[in-house]
Amino acid sequence: MNARTSQKTPRPIGEDVPRVDAREKVTGAAQFADDLQFGPGLLYARIKRSPHPHALLKKVDVSRARKLPGVKAIVTGEDFPGFIGLYLQDRYIFCRDRVRYVGDPVAGVAAVSEEIAEKALELIEVEYELLPGVFDPEYGASPEAPLLHPDLGKYEAVNFIFPEPGSNISNHFKLRRGDPEAAWKECAAIVESVYRIPHIQHVPLETHIAVARVDMDGKVKLWGSSQSPFAQRNLIAKALNISQSDVQVIAPFVGGGFGSKAGVSMEALAVAIASQVRGRPVKLRLTREEEFYTAFVRQGMVAHFKMGCDQAGRLLAMENSYYWDGGAYTEYGVNITRAAGYSCTGPYHVPNVRADSYCVYTNHPVGGPMRGFGMPEMHSGLEQCIDELAEKIGMDKVAFRKLNCIKTGDTVVTGMTMHPTGLEQCIVKAADASGWGHKDPPMAPFKRRGKVIAVMWKAPAMPPNAGSSSEVLLNEDGTVTVKVGGQEIGQGSFTIAAQVAAATLGVPYESVRVSGPLDTDTSPYEWQTVASRLTWSMGNAVAAAARDARQQILDMVAESWGESADDLDIVDGNVISYKSEESLPLKNIVIYGLPKPNDQGWIGGPVVGRGNFMPTYVTGLDAQTGQGPRAVVHYTTGAQAVEVEVDLETGRVEVLRGVTAFDVGKAINPELVRAQMEGGFVQGMSTALFEALQLKEGVVQNPSFVDYRIATSADAPGEIQSIIVEVPQEDGPWGARGIGEHPMVPTIPAIANAIYDAIGLRPGAPPYSSEKIYLLMQEAGLVE
Amino acid sequence: MTITPHPSLPEFDYIRPASLAEASEFLAHHAEDARPLLGGTDLFVRMRDGFIHPRFLVDVKYLDGTDSLSFNLDGKGTTEAGLTCGSAVNMNRLIASPEVQARYPLLAEACRSVASYQLRTRATLVGNLCNASPAGDTIGACLVYQAVLQVHGVNGFRQEPLADFFLGPGKTRLKPGDIVTAVHFPPPPEGSTGIYLKLGRNQLSDLAIVGVTVLGFPDQGTISGYRFRIALASVAPVPLRVRQAENYLAEQLLSPDRLREAAVLAMGTCSPIDDVRGSARYRQAMVRNLTRKGLEAVSSRLLHAQDPN
Amino acid sequence: MAIHSITLTVNGFSEQVEVPSNLTLLQLLRDKLALTGTKNGCTAGECGACTVILNGEAVNSCMVLAVECQDAEVLTVEGLAQSGALDPIQTSLIEEGGVQCGFCTPGILMSAHALLQRNPAPSEADIREALVGNLCRCTGYLRIVEAIQKAGKKRLQIAAGGVS
């Protein structure tokens, strides 16, 4: 008998146990990277950055800066010829021959204080030769645009990215399925639209920070706020041409990531600078303003949609083109392009599809992964088109989605067969809970009320062989230490790890600790904490490690008792026999083993469980058609319903309530799942109503909280209802799949569709500011 | 060019003078190199952004009278009748004052709309006025309550009526050596009631994209029997009183149409610009809509007060 | 630049420190007193992550000069729990699930503490208004508001019943 095959779900799976990290966070004890103490030898770094969006780097003169008392080192691109990048190596650590965005690092200074390092920046003289800039992805993709990366053809790329050398297109994902040309003729209604989705930023409350130390023998130690210590170790080792085992990355709690702290960004700068002051730690932290435009941003995109359905409302064809404003470097962004390509239809069954997803270099901030990884940007326009099409064909908007939504066994746009999914359930439940079909009257005569739904899907976007591993160690007192490489960024991954270990081993939840901070020298490998993959992938690895530990314990006790391990179990921290009814607590034996009778020796030893998980079934996709047997591991699907009020006198859109329903397979901790649903909804709402990086000739006009507004406590809706649907994921722990990103994906189009329902005007691309909505109404003659 | 604020405050010397005379002399002597310090909430941001580089910050919060908040009903004693708010009084203290809530509720309402509770613990009314931002939330309320600033300079004390105080965005009549020690408000007109309508990008804590202040009170000297004072924020180089609309209302009998027309007049007198926060076109329309709303709310209260039935 | 010698009380402890004019209270707490519970999110008085209680009032410590804190009483998140027992705001925040990444949490706790001191039974609207200067990117605020309401009730119960 074994926990996995047991009929009943073991505790504490499915329970709302409190977070393992909550207490230290509310007492101020939880350590983040800037809280770590490094002693009086700590140096501080600041970065000299390009003020121009595109220019040749003619000369960097650091001689005056070097002489400033307190300056210990200055580095430039001359010192670091290696390329760095996750999917495509297109970036230098410091610019060498040209700068490609405002903020591009040109030199780095280490000094005894941050103030002195800052002063040194003013003494560094840089000569630029300005070049014409590219500020639009469609223009960037055209032959007229200047080439931002003339050496694109020489860059190393993974085999599922397809750059087009001689252009600014760093990835072109093609999807061809069926015959859209023929299908248009069969369509009774067609909608064609263009959406320009603006850049936004993740706005983690904790800005990026890294402390690097390079020892005399060249070994690198890096502390930082990081979602991906192992990816950082790998990419930095490659860029510096050293062994991964000579790079150690230590990552304490992350004060919000949302993707911005995945991959490598500013951390490489700290390591590079530290290599010039061997033996001393160097701290680099971004100001909030730098965070807005020199850290990863969420790239903008221009999306062309064309979709059509037959008289009965069945979707027949889609032709979509996505131009991603990837920014100066697209080493990470190329995969967003791909993910949007293979999921280009949204969660719908569409038999005829033509899609092109282009990642385009521009002289804009660097686009990187942000919660949703291309899905929020894509669904923003796609779900509005669907809404329009449903209306055009005269069909109820919920019914239209129910009819066309992807269902278990359907063939999705890449040719993959859809695994069991509860999307239709999510649609029905969200619609019911929102009171679909009935609208309450507005709260004032100058307000209009709108209510509608939007749906989504997303798969973890990652290499086909992204792996997880885990160790489960037992301690003298019978408590359990779980080691993972998956990071706690607020989503509750450590808590999930503890729950999975407790359930699999058979010990109380309270006796499980999760080891932190993550440390690539001692934590087991995890690809990255992204893609909403940890509960599923890391969860499987923890379960495997716990099973391994469990088996070691049962084998040892079985030998001691002269019984079969199959008759033994661990329940509540005690080894029990179903046969002899013996019972033995875990403590001591898990370290010291069991004595043989008559002092004849010992059985067992320290219990160390190990396990891993890596999906092995994801296939490649044809480069010309995007077709393949298994494009992704799985999709999480869901729906959101939103009720808004539009103020006719100011244009203000108020979100009154939200209903969010997602199929998570199995909620290991329902409260944590709901917390993601609420948090994602509000973050999505914030991007829908307030957020855009205002870019003018490559310069961000609003890089501060004063003019980049995010939702505050006063903006959160009155109510968010979270509905958990559970259609098990075949290879997830107790059927679980991810939820972290998904609640942010449908929120923009849900609000946009609700605005349309309220005032009869489509608001287009976000943000749906009061001004945008008022002027829209004014233009249409609805208001003065 | 994008701004590149420093990670921390630049270097300066913090000075705490022993007297107003010493403070004014020091400030006059150092001119642009020295600034008076109250709450610092605007000053620190601009210093960090690199827009100003004072060598000295002169803390004037502990000097005579700057910490007092007092109301004098009938002008007996040394102070004039009305409310005197010392320059060091923070906004939260002002908001919580029973006298302010009872007699100058519009002042409390305007202060309450500023930023956040934490910032209002440091920010001062006088600081907000001296900052002279066209978007200043409290300036409208101070204008309609006819504020007068008490200023100490190298030549001693003088009064500066707020109505003539602003010369342009961030520019006032203050000269080097000047320290505003208090702002004084005469007793408000009998039966007055007011509203501050502020439009931000999100619900609370934002700067004003458009701010409309309306004060109304019974006045036998007008045709309608009421007089209004209207001030606008964020739609001109300085916060302004809309005399044209005010006069118009004084010469008419009140009606919804008259209020609407006054709002259109207000729209016509302002000159908003396009900036990162909003467009001129939108601001124009909002001046009209919010002025109308403000006038409707205030006149409804006035009429109700006169005849509760 | 001038250096000032100041004495102040932090979480009940008397501290004497030398501070340059341009040092903020936040830097004093984090860099000189090793109280790293208070966080820096923006250095501009916008995000509230640096909120502490200064002389009984909530302030953004990044907007207060250390030199102005002579004789001041400062309370930070480290001082909230009394002799190991968590304050009701802390336990409520845990119970309601109002903690995710934890970076905004110390600032939120201090703003909540200041609110409950001046308004022991705040309405939902009161709480939302009081917290508007504390940005959170993870939770969506609803659970935080709920937690503070519950904490207010718990504190009143304790004050009335005298049992902690």
Image: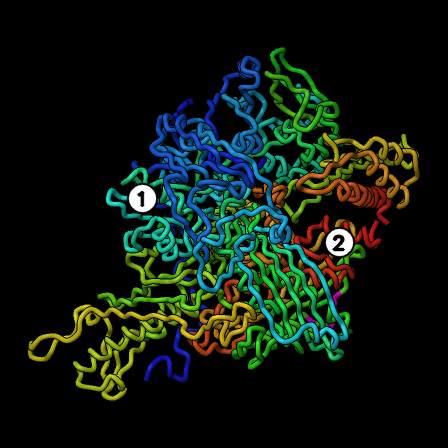
Whether A760 is drawn above or below C69: the answer is below
Q: Tag 2, which secondary structure?
A: strand
Q: What residue lies at 72% left-to-right and 48% top-to-bottom?
A: A771
Whether C131 is drawn above or below B269: the answer is below
The percent coordinates of residue A238 (x first, y second) are 35, 53
Whether A114 is drawn above or below A405: the answer is above
**Residue A369 or A40: which is nearer the viewer?**
A369
Residue A484 can be seen in this image: yes
**Residue B108 or A209: which is nearer the viewer?**
A209
**Residue A455 or A419: which is nearer the viewer?**
A419
Q: Amino acid at mark 1?
A: Arg
Q: Which residues are magenta?
A: A435-440
The percent coordinates of residue B81 (x first, y second) are 72, 24
Q: What residue lies at 81% left-to-right and 51% top-to-bottom?
A: A779
Residue under numbered circle 2: A647
The percent coordinates of residue C93 (x first, y second) are 48, 57
Binning the other alpha carbons within 10 Å of mark 1 as few (below 14), some (14 to 19) or many (20 upward) gives many
The percent coordinates of residue B52 (x first, y second) are 55, 26
Residue A421: quadrant of the picture = bottom right
Q: Amino acid at mark 2?
A: Asp
